[in-house]
Image (cartoon, rainbow, N blue to C red):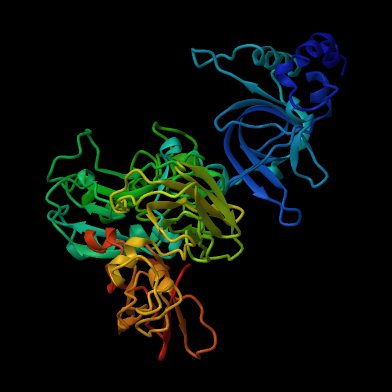
Amino acid sequence: MKTLCAHWTLLLILLLNPNFVRAASLAPLSPADQLDVSAAAFRGTVINLQPFADPNTGLIYTRTFLRVDEAFKGTLPNVVQVVHRGGRIGNRDDFAGESPRFDLQGEYLMFVIRGPDGKLQCTQASASAIRLVRAQDGLNFISPGRELLEAVRHLTGGKVLTGEDVTDQAGSAVVASAIVGMLNDLSSRFTDPDRGEPIPYVLDVDSLPSGITLAQATNAVAQAFNAWAAVTSLKFRFDGFQSFGQGADTITDDSSRIWIQLHDTYNRINGTGTVGIGGRTARNGASPAGWNLGGNVAGNEFEKSITGYVVLESTAAALQNLTTFTEVLTHEIGHALNLAHSSEVPTSDPLLSDAIMYFQAHGDGRGATLSAYDIPVIQQIYPANTPPYTFDRALDVTTAPTTPNIAGINEVQLRGYDLQSTNLTVATNYDQVVNGKFSLSGLKVKFTPSGYFSETERINPAEGGSFSGTLYFRFSDGTNASPYGTVRVYSFNPDSSATSDGIPDSWMIAYFGHNAPQSGDKSRATDDPDKDGLNNRQEYIAGTNPKDASSAQLITGVTRGTLSFQAKPFELYEVLATTNLTMWPQSGIPFQLTSAPIEVITNRPSTNVIATVSNLPVNLPQVFFRILKVP
């Protein structure tokens, strides 16, 4: 103990440096005292951050996983987890002044102690998590962390001091390796599985490795996909054979497919000894709030994967072995799903070297077998608790001398869906608002124009353009968040009436030949000239013809698993189903008609547009359907 205390004065001065004490009032301990009172001490690298909400209090905490690079005290596992108050989940950020804020891949000098719950925490809050910054040579550390690290090394004399056995606080491979194995800043994910939909894949089998039959190759591909599906929320669907006519890696469509090419006829593989390549194309559409198109999983934001690919070198001798062929397929599909290599260089770490995502094929007969490394990585991207999903909403705004305040006019409802939970919350971010403002009440978004404006040409939502207003929103289940959706103003449409009924002049003229509501031709908002049960205002909102009883929200066709109905392009519909005419749960995935002809998409008075859904149940003997247009 005398040896430790002999350096107290010098090191206390170092520890009082404001770089080591932030956002909390502390009576700092010297490194000698911290070593004395701590259960363990080490130098480590942050390899994962996992925020979570306490189920009892709702408070946010963060598990930080650090790889132990140098031990100073205690019996330590290879990866240690510490838990502190604070963190970010979705759009909620909880900051606790006394807690350290760790950086992913950051290096730290750590002093830890057990909390009342037995979990490890920093001995003296942020003052016990000292950030270590590398010099330009990448080997040494710079001041002020360097001095503290050298002092601790001197105090321990190159030995590991006796402390507590904290191996029960090991960071499991299930979580600790997750972030490292993703593509980090370039991470993306397919969003179809969040809706319970499979990712389709297509096979180009124009050439196969010698000795591998078509049946064997097709089965090997299925095994490779099944390996990833077995441990995640992923589903896959074989969409048949096709000659691509180009390298699979050069296909840049927006089909959300994975293109599997079992040969390299187009010379896409250049590396000597390389037997396969895999990857994906993604779309980055970050909102002003930093939200992205692939959603958020446990605090990690993702771009949206729009296509994946695999190319194999069918002439490679190694691929003539069926199990190696299957292993390489599984590896390259991992890349298509956003996984990086477990290591880019030879390593003696069995966690990394045994992974299917190791940079070298093992050729040991494992086939499509994932390791303790691969499973947590893919689960960090495609968890069993899938993120919520949502749909964009469209607004055609009515402007008038007196701004209309009528239900259903200039407003839409936001909808969030989740395969596991209905307990979702919505967050919004405002941007690009012109000549008006958005307001949110519960799930209802209303746009209030700032004046009476002349008619604007309607933006074609299929092509994008300069919208008159955009509201960004997303849904969260408390752990994961949906890709963002938008509410966009596509057009301004004047109603010249002194007291607006919400129906614009252009719509009135298209159907009644005049813009002034009249009782004689039943052109008032509450009239129903075609006697189909919808008044004129409801027909305007629904996008149907007020003078044609056959133009209504009607189911027009039913076959096994498929339903057709009249719809308005870019509106949101839910298909409800029942077997007893009492309970009407949602059936299948909510639906937006986005494939209508361009003249229908941009011309509001067009009617009788047919939408077809085909994701309905087929295993029930008798089902009744109805269509709900989301307001």
Rendered location of residue 136, percent (x, y): 49, 13
Left or right: 194, with 8 as reference point? left
The residue that appears at 52% across and 64% down in the rendered structure is 406
- Between 19 and 359, the one nearer to me in the picture: 19
- Between 326 and 575, the one nearer to me in the picture: 575
The residue that appears at 55% across and 49% down in the rendered structure is 428
Q: Is residue 236 above or below residue 50?
A: below
Left or right: 266, with 69 as reference point? left
Rendered location of residue 115, percent (x, y): 80, 41
Q: Is residue 362 above or below residue 39?
A: below
- Between 607 and 564, the one nearer to me in the picture: 607
Q: Is residue 164 visible?
A: yes
Q: Is residue 380 visible?
A: no
Left or right: 51, with 468 as reference point? right
Residue furthest to the top in view is 10
Q: Is residue 514 above or below residue 362?
A: below
Rendered location of residue 344, percent (x, y): 39, 33
- Between 575 and 450, the one nearer to me in the picture: 450
Q: Quadrant of the N terminus?
A: top right
Q: Quadrant of residue 424?
A: bottom right
